[in-house]
């Protein structure tokens, strides 16, 4: 068999399997407990958090582990939308693209239907790319979140994340001159990009998920 869907799921790497085996048999304690087995598991968990932070150019305290990409994207998008609604006392505006994974598109559509969020879904060009100028034009006073994936899971298109991050940074600088109190959060679904591209969150100007 020739298998060509490794972007969706793939056999576990042997090095990963060996690393994880001890946590399935030896280091199995509850990391929230205070006894020895729990402290051992807690130490392993915090070591993993520090390693992830180094790869992302983030602080360990900023790393949140979830069960997978769908939960990560849901947490980021819904969390920002809820916080923005509280600040604005009004419905937040969310910008995304037409080529996002369903876990992003379905979430923003849910926010639109259930909570009245205003959604702008940007088109892409013939190469599947979002134009950063389109992002700039779509931003308004109530914009709370921009979500554009880094690498497309179907065709592999690499979106201009740094350029979009620059657009959002400039918009936030302008907002800093007012009393709005709301800064735009830039979220990117980087699941398909993490092992291959620069995922330093500061250089990208983005909140990564995946």
Image: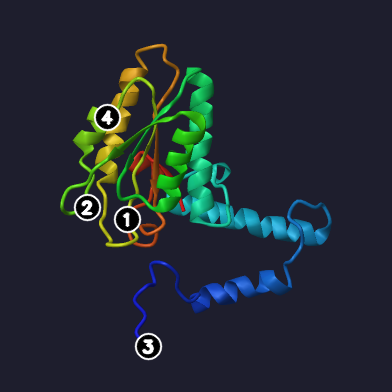
Tags 4 and 3 touching, CB below 8 Å? no
- Which numbered dot is residue 1? 3
How far, Cα to Cα, is label 2 from label 4? 18 Å
| Dot 1 alpha-carbon crowd within 10 angstroms: few under 14, some 14 to 19, many 20 or more | many
Which residue in the rendered view is the most extreme toward the left?
A: 126
Name the residue beneath numbered marker 4: 138
Name the residue beneath numbered marker 1: 151
Secondary-structure class at tag 3? loop
Going from the N terminus, do you reach mark 1 or mark 2 first?
2
- Which numbered dot is residue 128? 2
Residue 104 lies, in percent from the top left, at 42, 47
Give the vertical position of 162 relative to 34 (above or below).
above
Residue 37 lies, in percent from the top left, at 79, 62
Residue drawn where x is 59% and y is 72% of the image: 19
Foreground residue, 184 or 112?
112
How far, Cα to Cα, is label 1 from label 4? 22 Å
Q: Is residue 53 left or right of residue 139?
A: right
How far, Cα to Cα, is label 2 from label 3? 30 Å
Give the vertical position of 23 relative to 128 (above or below).
below
Which residue in the rendered view is the most extreme toward the front?
A: 113
Q: Is residue 49 left or right of residue 137?
A: right
State which mark lies toward you, 1 or 2: 2
| Residue 185 in view (yes/no) | yes
Tags 1 and 4 touching, CB below 8 Å? no
Is the N terminus in the top left, top right, bottom left or bottom right quadrant? bottom left
Residue drawn where x is 67% and y is 73% of the image: 22
Secondary-structure class at tag 4? helix
Foreground residue, 180 or 19?
180
| Dot 3 alpha-carbon crowd within 10 angstroms: few under 14, some 14 to 19, many 20 or more | few
């Amino acid at each position: 068999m020739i298998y060509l869907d490794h972007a969706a799921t793939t056999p576990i790497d042997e090095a990963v399997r060996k690393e994880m085996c001890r946590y399935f048999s030896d280091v199995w304690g509850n990391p929230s407990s205070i006894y020895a087995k729990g402290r051992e598991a807690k130490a392993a968990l915090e070591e993993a958090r520090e390693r992830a932070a180094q790869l992302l150019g983030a602080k360990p305290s900023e790393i949140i582990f979830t069960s997978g990409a769908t939960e990560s994207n849901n947490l980021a998008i819904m969390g920002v939308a809820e916080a923005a609604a509280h600040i604005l006392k009004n419905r937040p505006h969310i910008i995304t693209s037409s080529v996002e994974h369903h876990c992003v598109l379905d979430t923003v559509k849910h926010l639109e239907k259930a909570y009245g969020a205003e959604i702008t879904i940007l088109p892409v060009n013939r190469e599947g790319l979002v134009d950063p100028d389109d992002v700039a034009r779509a931003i308004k006073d109530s914009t709370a979140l921009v979500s554009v994936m880094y690498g497309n899971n179907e065709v592999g298109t690499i979106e201009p994340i740094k350029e979009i991050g620059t657009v959002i940074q400039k918009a936030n600088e302008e907002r800093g001159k007012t009393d709005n109190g709301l800064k735009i959060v830039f979220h990117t679904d980087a699941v398909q990009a993490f092992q291959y591209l620069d995922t330093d969150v500061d250089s990208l100007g983005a909140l990564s998920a995946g």
